[in-house]
Image (cartoon, rainbow, N blue to C red):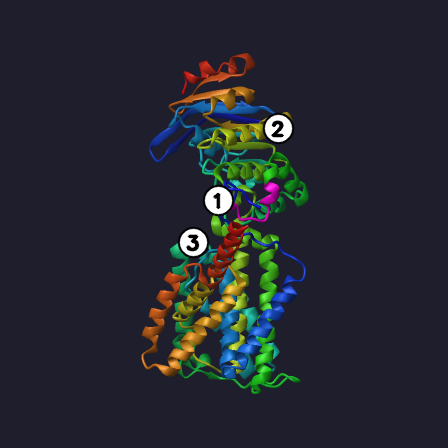
Amino acid sequence: MLEVSGIDAAYGHAKVLHDVSLKIQQGEMVFVVGRNGAGKTTLLQTISGLMAPTAGRILFGGEEIHGLPAEKLARKGIRFVAQDKKVFSDLTVRSNIELASYATGEDLTQAIGRLTRIYPKFQEFLDRKAGGLSGGQREILLIGRALVGKPRLLLIDEPTEGLAAIVIEDIFRILNEMKREKVSAFIVEQNLSVVSRLADRIYIMKEGKIIKEMADRAEIAKTAELEGYL
Amino acid sequence: MEKKGQILDTFPVAPFRKGTLARDIVVIAASFTFMALFIPLHWAIDFTIFCILVLSFDLLYGFMGRLSFGHVLYYGTGAYVASLMLLHVSRNPFLAIAAGVVVGAVLAILLGFVVLQTDGAPFALINLAFNQIGFWLAASGLQQYTKGEDGLNTPVGKVGFLDFANQPIAFAFLLICLLLVFLLLRIFTLSPYGVTIRSIKENDDRVKFLGYNIFTYKWLTFVLSSTLAAFPGTLFALFYGFVAPTIISPFGNVEVIFAVLIGGAGNLYGAIAGGVVYKLMSNYLATNITRWEMLLGILLLIWVFKFRRGLTGYASEMILRLKRKQAAEV
């Protein structure tokens, strides 16, 4: 589904990604792990169209998507959930979903139904401004919004970062639901408990390079081994 | 009942309900009619025209977050085109309105492609630059048509009951115009289009991630806002029967910006309330105090600092506090 071949990316003269290659199959949940500064977020931003790679190719469904603006990628079914948990804070929770519903053409009732199914508490918050949500609730809203219109691929940057343990379990439950429904996802994550329970494949990054790929469930489940890379 | 840890600090936003529009229209119409009983009628007419201009600006600034220092360019264009239409083509006021609005729209369509290449301060200033050009054209560059500083006297004809020389009739007509603009903007801002432009105000990039071509939305909003600004310009020309370059002076933008800030940006009720409060302050001060501009400036500064979210924002906070108090008592 997504094939990244030999991409480089740089901030000015500082090269951040070096010859990165990876692939995501239809229905796979793929994680990227690595220390801070390893280039994980840059990789996600490059795939999502926020940054232009300086070399290499990015194919999505066999089509070159390198250099396409974010709105065109979105129309191809790629959704990006950024790390900063920024919702449209002045809009209501309902309007946040409406916005995605209008763009994708999915029925609003259906979209809101999905959101309240994955997180029932939203039922009572629908007509409140999203700016008042907690960090975890914002993340869930962002994931719920990204799921509107049945995306072909979700790119999620550190969904559990800075969240309390109880909220991390909520996020885990939602990601697990996505996995059961075979939603393809590429997720940057540092929480190894979440990664080891959900990943179909893991890429480990260090200093802008992918240093290891793990696709064996038994190997992935060994959290202790993964810790060695963080 | 909300529990701690949930969203206690948010003001609930009522969903759009049938009948709300009718209620809004009745409230505004009644308020303006009531106000007209206590102030000179020509003031009420002037306030009504100004409030339409403020509403148009609120769409661009309050709802989409694009501050322009050149909004009165379109107001002035509407006024001049309507005047020229009345002078040279027909004395029919409706034709004058149509001509002013169409030319304002065409100007916005063209300039929109240029000014929307920028954002933030450059957007505000490039609009100011175009406004300044418009002012120069009216005052000097096109003075064989505009009569420069002398201005244009515009003969307005009667159409059926509509006689702009009759103040009560003119007021009724202008009030209907205000209500129509309010109605149009209310429908637009509550529609999917409204949700989209409010989200563009918050974060352009995130809207792109949802698949929206945000330039189209920004351009449409700019054109709609500017066209709606040309409309009260035509009404000004019809009511006063005279147009001079001061109507297109860039200083006029300050009045509109202050009015939106007084009322609360991004709220149509706020735009109308802000327009009325600004005009009341400036008119009363100008009538009673010699150096009134300085006092007005001080009053506006105090107002903007004291009520940072405007009248409507302040009202929302008061309601929220009341609800919290009631919840605490339970």
Name the residue carrying label 1: B205
Q: In the image, what residue occupies the spot 50% across and 68% down?
A: B273
Q: Chain of mark 2?
A: A
Name the residue carrying label 3: B118
A14 shown above or below B47: above
Q: Residues within 10 Å of mark 2 (few under 14, many from 20)?
A: few
- Which residue sits furthest front? B329
Give the numbered dot on residue A177.
2
Q: Nearer the viewer, residue B57 or B126?
A: B57
Number of the front mark, 3 or 1: 1
Q: Amino acid at mark 2?
A: Glu
Q: Residues within 10 Å of mark 3 (few under 14, many from 20)?
A: few
Q: Nearer the viewer, residue B310 or A204?
A: B310
Tell which circle, 3 or 1, labels the residue nearer the N-terminal end.
3
The answer for how far apart the CA atoms under marks 3 and 2 are is 43 Å
Which of the 4 image quadrants contains residue B238? Answer: bottom right
The answer for how far apart the CA atoms under marks 1 and 2 are is 28 Å
Residues drawn in magenta:
A122-131
Q: Nearer the viewer, residue B324 or A95?
A: B324
